[in-house]
Amino acid sequence: GSDTTWMATLDVDEYLILVGDEYTSLRHWLEHITETEQSTKILSFFQTRALPNIDTMVPYDGNPTGVCNGEINDGDSASSLLARHKWGKKLNRLNGTDVLKSTCVMKDPNKTYMETYNCEPTVHPKPDSYAWRAKKQIYRPDFVLNHFVHYSLVTRLILDKPLKESPRFAERRPYERRVNELTEGYLLHSKTTVPDSTSQWYNECPQKGDTTSKKDKCAVGIPAAEVLGEKSLREKGNIQMSSVSSLFESNCFRHSRVLNEWVPKLELALRNIS
């Protein structure tokens, strides 16, 4: 309606995460944009698919599938493989080793999707080269007349300046700009990694010191000791070296704001509902 200032359409597995200390809510941030950036009509969040943090997952206990049959021979288990590795001596001191004995893993039903998928595959800001393709947008409906999933297809400029050439899948500045992922916010995409995709993840994820395996084959998140912080690309964080992930090469980064603020707030809100 005519009273709508900003609009967005998000999937249920997408979270808009505020970062920094300047804004207390999305409304607060958007009010600031409205007051200070009158020419800005589209705010674009670049997107990458987050990985499920292995330290938050549990053994698959659903119906047997082609690759997740729940049966695993001791000689083929990750525990057995790691026992023959130089890191194997740590196994008896680790927490959550059940995931090493299961063919597949799944999300812990007692944890939120936000906590499980708080593992970004790249540092921030996200790569320009590909993260723009699945961007999500908050836009002003008096400027964007037709929007489809990721892109603003028809804008007021087409009516006002029909002969002016516009970039593909984007509007020129100042009408569209990318959200600053270090000082404003970012999009956490928690698209589900199904158990079948995690089959024998411990064979696909490189162990510490293994330079022969490729990280892009690893379907689960191995969190780095560093976390994404508010004022820098990486900020030293805490990771329990007694966790299963400590045996493998990291392939993703948790965000400190999600870890310390937004997950607890979400858990509290869910408890109040129930």
Image: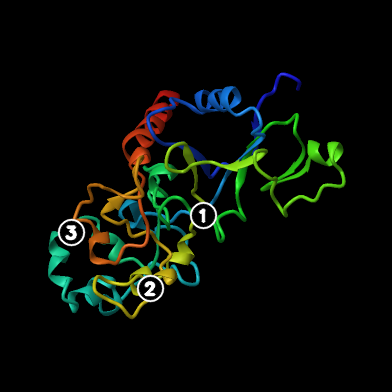
**Which residue is more in the foreground, 121 or 78?**
121
Measured Cα–Cα span from mark 1 to mark 3: 31 Å
Residue 79 in view in this figure: yes
Rate crowding at label 1 as few (under 14), some (14 to 19) or many (20 or more) other CA atoms within 10 Å: many
Q: Residues within 10 Å of mark 2 (few under 14, many from 20)?
A: some
Picture quadrant of residue 203: bottom left
Alpha-carbon distance for marks 2 and 3?
Answer: 20 Å
Of the image marks 2 and 3, the number of the one nearer the N terminus: 3
- Earlier in the chain: of badge 2 and badge 1, it is 1
Seen in the picture, residue 117 relative to 222 is either above or below; the reply is above
Q: Which mark is residue 48?
A: 1
Q: Going from the N terminus, do you reach mark 1 or mark 3 first? A: 1
> In the rendering, at what x and y percent does residue 9 appear?
65, 38
Choose mark 1 or mark 3, whichever is in front.
Answer: 1
- In the rendered image, residue 33, in percent from the top left (x then y), is placed at 57, 28
- 257 in relation to 248, above or below: above
Residue 64 in view, yes or no: no
- Find disc 2 in the rendering and name its residue: 204
Q: Position of residue 192 (x, y in %)?
A: 50, 53
Label 3 near label 1: C-beta < 8 Å?
A: no
Three-letter amino acid code of the residue under disc 1: Thr
Task: Residue at 39%, 52% (x, y): give it.
Answer: 119
Disc 3 target residue: 94
Q: Residues within 10 Å of mark 3 (few under 14, many from 20)?
A: some
